[in-house]
Amino acid sequence: MTMLFVLCGEVLRYKTMKYKNIVKGKFISRLNRFIANVEINGKTEIAHVKNTGRCKELLVPSADIYLEKSDDPKRKTKYDLICVLKENGVFVNIDSQVVNHIAADWLKRSGIFSENAIIKREVKYGSSRFDIYIEDGERKAFMEVKGVTLEDKGEVRFPDAPTARGVKHINELIKCIDDGYEAYILFVIQMKGVSYFTPNDLTHKEFGDTLRRASKKGVRIIAVDCIVSSDSIEIDSEVEVRL
């Protein structure tokens, strides 16, 4: 096994992610991938959207949303849009940055690795950088973590927009398998009440084809749902994967 990796991150110890200073609002419009117009207490404000995906089925006019108010006076936007309440009463967290944090706690209680496993973020291997590196005795593994927010009648899909970067990550994990490491892709479904996960071939068939090839090569594909509220998110249970 070629040891060509650099441990860049700190050991992770997370469980439920709790947000602070949460306020309720209404979604108005998305100005670009990062900024949206929102209504808070009858006043129009701009907010940072913590998800660069399309989220078209979630970010609809007048949707109930939850935002975290920043106490940093230097910020251009005072609010981060972190959660949407769907018409069916389901909370959907859309913070794409949170999934790597909550993945570490789930890994330690998932049974895949021991409670003593060393888990680190943003680890470089060769010319690649993976979300998580796990070392558990003789076992060494790399993992990519993807947040999932697209749901339709219980079916959840990824991606919601073409992702060349996602395809690259999968191919790099296949190389890790070839080099003797374990490799995983963890799809974190940022809501409850779903039936199964499947790749979104209609949006990006190359991603689905590459995911299926990776599975055959030995990359383990896992999907988990989350308990979500207006101010928190925690990984809960495994969900069926249909490739």
Image (cartoon, rainbow, N blue to C red):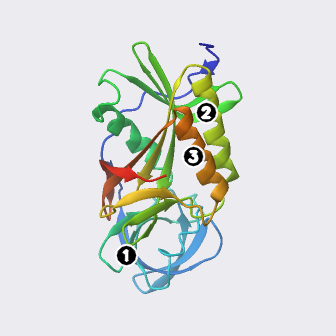
Please identify the residue farthest to the front as the structure is shown.
Answer: 216
Query: Residue 152 appears in which quarter of the rendering?
Result: bottom left
What is the three-letter code of the residue carrying label 1? Lys
Residue bearing mark 3:
211
State which quarter of the image contains the N terminus.
top right
Q: CA distance from mark 2 to mark 3?
A: 10 Å
Q: Which residue is mark 1?
A: 86
Residue 63 horizontal/vertical position (percent): 43, 81
Residue type highlighted by circle 2: Ile
2 and 3 marks in contact (CB < 8 Å) = no
Nearest to viewer (mark 1 / mark 3): 3
| 155 to 235, vertically: above or below | below
Q: Which residue is painted at 67% across and 54% down in the image?
A: 206
Location of residue 134 in the rendering, given as x and y in whole percent from the top left corner? 45, 25
The image quarter in which residue 153 lies: bottom left
Alpha carbons under labels 1 and 3: distance apart: 29 Å
Viewer-proximal residue among 83 and 141: 141
Looking at the image, is mark 1 or mark 3 earlier in the sequence?
1
Residue behind mark 2? 174
Where residue 226 sits: x, y (%)?
33, 54
Residue at 62% x, 24% y is 178
Question: Measuring 64% from the left and 58% from the top, which residue is drawn there?
Answer: 205
What is the three-letter code of the residue carrying label 3? Leu
Residue 136 percent across, percent down from the top left: 39, 19
